[in-house]
Image: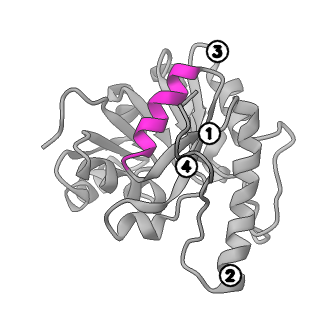
Amino acid sequence: MSDTSKPVIGIIGGTGDLGSGLAKCWAAAGYRVLIGSRSRDKAVALAPELGEGVEGEDNVGAARAADIVILAVPFASHDATLNEIRDVVQGKIVVDAAVPLVPPKVSTVQLPEAGSAAKIAQAILGENVRVVSAFHNVGATKLHAGGKIDCDVLVFSDDKDARNAVIELAGAVANRGVGGGVLANSAAAEALTSVLIWINRTYKVPGAGIAITGLEDAVRA
């Protein structure tokens, strides 16, 4: 059953591998989750498979009804999707999980001219949206396996409160969220995704992740 004290999460691209995996984990942790898709019917059909508290909507409907919006779409659809939801996310936290992968060389770092997908998101959405960047290095296969995945999640934002809110969300799907500083630093995590893809292919592993050491007694900043 969803906990009404928790924020409602809207996942744009929620029928994809990453989006549906995140939805499954957050629903298991008691969050109400709206999965958005270009096809509302597709989202409505998938929602019951992801757990109690998951509902289907179209992208705009999910973004409008959510307290925190997660963007989990391929980079090829990134800008168009942001423009689609821009008007209904003003004043909200939008978490950009998009990675600027350029097929076929997805194991080679190819950051956009703007520096990162997250910086593009902030420019499109405007200063009234609290953009956070996170969940780039989380393996969708492991999310669908059930339970928390054994990795840390780096979280970036120029807004400290928004960053801390997403660090808490990350703790429901992985070992913990770790603040990585301002939004510009997201370029490091976005680039790291290509490195992890290379590691997966080279070492024949299903989803390499990252862990930040030395934080056992640290106080969150």
Label 2, label 3: how far apart the Cα atoms are: 39 Å
Q: Amino acid at mark 3?
A: Glu
- Vertical comparison of 147 with 89: above or below: below
Label 1, label 3: how far apart the Cα atoms are: 18 Å
Q: Amino acid at mark 4?
A: Val
Q: Quadrant of residue 221?
A: top right
User: Disc 1 marks which residue?
Assistant: 80
Query: What number of labels is visible?
Result: 4
| Front one among 152 and 184 | 152
Q: Secondary structure at mark 1?
A: helix
* Quadrant occupied by the N terminus: top left
Label 4, label 3: how far apart the Cα atoms are: 25 Å
Question: Residue 47, image x and y in percent?
Answer: 25, 54
Residue range (magenta): 160-172
User: Disc 2 marks which residue?
Assistant: 201
Label 4 vs 2, first from the N-terminus:
4
The mark lying in front, picked from 4 and 3, is: 4
- Vertical comparison of 146 with 71: above or below: below
Q: Quadrant of residue 202?
A: bottom right
Q: Amino acid at mark 2?
A: Arg
The mark lying in front, picked from 2 and 3, is: 2
Q: Most extreme residue toward the left, as rendered?
A: 1
Q: What kind of secondary structure does the magenta stretch mostly adopt?
A: helix
- Crowding at dot 3, Cα within 10 Å, few <14 / some 14-19 / many 20+, comes out as few
Residue for point 31% across, 41% down: 34
- Crowding at dot 4, Cα within 10 Å, few <14 / some 14-19 / many 20+, comes out as many
Residue for point 57% across, 43% down: 134
Q: Secondary structure at mark 2?
A: helix
